[in-house]
Each structure stands twice: as C-alpha cells, then as structure tokens.
Amino acid sequence: EESKKVIITEDESLPKATKAKIVKLEPLRGQRVRVSGWIHRLRIQQELTFIVLRDGTGYLQAVLTGQLTKTYDAKTLELEAAVELTGTLQVVPEGKTAPGGHELTVDFWRTLGSAPGAEDAFSNRLNEQSDPSIMADLRHLVLRGETASGVLRLRAALLSAFRTTYEAHNVLEVTPPCLVQTSVEGGATLFQLPYYGQEAYLTQSSQLYLETCLPSLGDVFCVQESFRAENSHTRRHLSEYTHLEAELAFITFNDLMSHIEAVICETVDKLLANPIAASIIQQLNPGFKAPARPFKRMAYAEAINWLNEHGIKHEAEDAGGNVIKDEQGNAKMVEHAIGDDIAEAAERQMTDIIGTPIFLYGFPAELKAFYMKKMPREKGATGPIFTESCDLLMPNVGEIVGGSMRIADMEELFEGYKREGIDPKPYYWYTDQRKYGTCEHGGYGLGVERFLAWLANRYTVRECTLYPRWPGRATP
Ligand code: 4AD
C-alpha cells in the first residue's frame, strides 16, 4: 500500500530523449533514449531491478535504481508487461556483456500494459516441460520466446534472400490464386469448398499456373501457400505450407537440377553473409556449413539397390494397400523392388547415412503426377517407364524439393490425363499451353518449412511457420 504513494516524474531539465527501436541504439550511446518493449527477463535485487527488454528488433539490458523501484508499477512488474523506459545508454564496462554491448540506466519509466503474476504469470502458463498440445494452444505466447522468434526472423531473411537470388537469375515473381478448380498432385489430398454453387479447392501447387506464365513473362516463381488434406502426423507434413515454386522455359532436365542447386546454394551464401541471419543460424544450428557443390545425383534405380545393400526394408502391403502384419502385430518388412515408392522412413535413413544433399531422380511414371515428362526408353528395355523428375533430399529432413520436366507434347499430355483418370475439360487452359507454341520446360516446388527445418536444425516443420496447421489443428 505504501508503494502506491511513490510517484515518479520525468526530470524536465534533462536533455530531450530520442525515441528509438533497440536495433537502432548503437549510434545513440551516451545520449538519453526512450525505448518501448516487453519485459523479457526480470531480476529484482533490493533497490535494483534488472530488466532485459524486448521490442522485436532486439534485446536491451536496463537497470532501475532507487525511487524507480518503489512505485506501484515497479512493485507489480511482471514478465511480459509492456513498458516504456527512458534513460542514458551506456557502454557496458570491460569484462561485462550485454546484448548490443550497452545498457540503459533508466531515469524515468512507466508501465504501458501490465501482465499478471502468480498463477496466471507468463512463466507459469509456459514452461518448457509443457505438453506439446498445450504448447500448440499457446503458440501465440511461445512466439515471444527467443527460439521461436529466431526461427521466424530467419524465415523472413530466407524468403528475402530467395527473392534476391531469383532476381539475379531473371526469374519474375507472380502471385497465383489459392482458390482453384483443378488438382495438381491428385484428388486424394484436395481440400474442397463450396464456391458460388460450384466446387472449388484450396491449391495444392501453383505449378500449372506458373507454366501458363512462361510465354507471357518468361521464367517465373511464386511464394504461395499450398494445402494438403493428408492425414500425415509426421515431423515434415503440414496441412498448409509455404510453397516456393519456379518454372523455367527452354531448359533440359540437367539444367533444371543445376538451377535448383544454384538457387539453394546462392541463397544460403546470402544468408551466411547477412550478420543477423548468420547469427541466428549459429544459435539454432551451431557449426552449420553451406553444403558442398555439386550435389550428389542418384538415379531412382540406384537408390533401390542402395537401400537393399544397406538392409533398409519397407512395410509389405497387400493389393489394397494395407500393411501386412504378423501374429504379434508387427509389420512384415520386405526388400525394395523397382517400381516401389521410396517411403519417408527409408528415404530419411538413406539421407542421414549419406549425410549430404542428394538429388534422387528418374522416378517411375506410375508413381508420379500426370504432367511429368518421360525419359526415352532404351531399346529392348522392359519394366517401368521413368520420368525426368527429381527430389532433393537433405540430411535430417529428407525431401525438401520436388521437381520435373513437364510434358510438352499435347498427345502425350492427353495420355497422362488418361493414365491418372483425369477429365481433361477443366484443364483446357493447361492443354492450350501445348497448342500455342509449346516448349520444353520444367520447374519445382520447395517446402519453405522443410528448408528451414534443415537450415535451423528444427525437429519438425511445425516450428518453422507462424501458426502451423496439421490434421485437427487450425487454432490459434
Ligand atoms: O513434391 P510436391 O508434392 O510437388 C509439387 O507440388 C509440384 N507440383 C511442385 C512443382 O513442381 N512446382 O511438393 C513439393 C514440395 C515437397 O518437396 C515438400 O518440400 C513440400 O513441397 N511439401 C510439403 N511440405 C509440408 N507439408 C506437406 N504436407 C508437404 N507436401 C509437400
């Protein structure tokens, strides 16, 4: 009750304070500054209150002394309160460290938005042992932490670096629609919605639209949300993810893989040359080094042999696609054969053993989408027809990019529609590309969250987006 009576006022005889964000403070050392932010850390020691303030641009250490620690605001100060601090910015003495190398000696301050203590205190609601589903419900508070905000800051730098890289390669950014009426990667994973008396979907990929841009704008890319109604509760599947896709005209399959490698490596180099991004990478993924070039290239058939040589098996399935189990309920494990899909578990084991980026290329047409260009068949060859398709696999994550050359010939495209049981009618605009000046072309999609999981060594893609969506979760 005593504290309610201690009132502080700003001393008008002091030099006028400059309002600034934390990241801009260095040139203001020795001067009076005014900084607003949230209480990130708080330590109270009798007549000294030590604060680490956070404003989204950085962290600032501040100290309150004397009467400043006796006000009502001071007595009720809690983590995550919003405050305004005014004082003189001083270089920290030799041998001491603080974020930015300086500290604010406060002469006036006030609470702008208080935060509760006791049971409802921030640190009580959020502690690192919390159950993952509680943490997901509290994502809006988790975001205030150093790790989550570091990942998101790195994500912003990554998108910006990709854009700079594409500009240097004369690839133009476009923004295709999210509401569509065609599927790209098969009907099984489409989210459907009613649309003015018609049916529409949330896009799975902007690829088909990017292809239509080639004769108009030349090589193009987009950063767009893609949606997949997959019931996959894995470390690397989201129901909504950020899809970086590009499409290039007049290229060969070899050009396509070289381009993907160049874009990734140049983007990583830009991040490592950016002091803020580099320090976040260092903090989240200590010892990270840019991958060596060229990336290893491995044909699909080679990979099947590699898996068998290394004793990596997969679960046997019956004709209906159900896993075959023994009496104990354990899945029957069998060797890989040409024609098999390489499942996530096997792909991951291979990538982790090899330990470098791998282009896995030439998947059987049966396993892939309708639009993929086929490889010429060797004379007398039997077995599956392979496609000019590639996945880029990264250690710790597995597939981060999927790409291919596209069918340029109209008749071949109609065969593709037929093989996949697709009605060509809604695809008339896609078919027209083959009618009016068709050309050899190809492209790819990169999962931004997967890329970030690799770069920042995150356990799951759920940590790599602002508000992740997975089966059953669309809150907050
Ligand atoms: O291999 P996908 O399905 O390929 C396509 O959609 C092509 N049409 C892209 C193109 O050629 N323009 O997806 C491409 C990438 C994957 O390699 C993966 O990184 C990411 O998108 N991805 C997902 N990321 C998170 N959650 C999911 N459910 C994902 N599905 C695909």
Image (tube, rainbow, N blue to C red):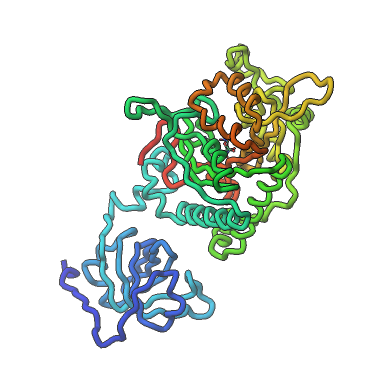
The quadrant the C terminus occupies is top left
Quadrant of picture, ligand 1? top right
Residue 183 screen position, x and y as percent: 50, 29
**In the rendered view of the protein, which quadrant contains the N terminus?**
bottom left
Q: Nearer the viewer, residue 146 or 426?
A: 426
From the top left corner, tell me how far across and down residue 200 is, in percent.
Answer: 40, 29
Which residue is pictured at 67% across the width and 55% down the height? 290
Image quarter for residue 67? bottom left
- Viewed as shown, does residue 334 lie left or right of 32? right
**Residue 312 against residue 40 in the figure, above or below:** above
Q: Give whichever of 261, 125 is nearer the camera.
A: 261
Q: Residue at x 21, y 76 (%)?
A: 8
Q: Answer with left or right where residue 46 lies relative to residue 262.
A: left
Which residue is situated farthest in the right direction here? 380
- Relative to 392, is 265 above or below? below
From the viewer's perspective, is 54 left or right of 345? Answer: left
Q: Which residue is nearer to you in this view: 440 or 340?
A: 440
Query: Where is residue 143 drawn, in percent x and y?
Result: 41, 51
Can the viewer see residue 450? Answer: no
- x%, y% of residue 208? 54, 35
Residue drawn 56% across the image and 62% down it: 279
Residue 351, quarter of picture: top right
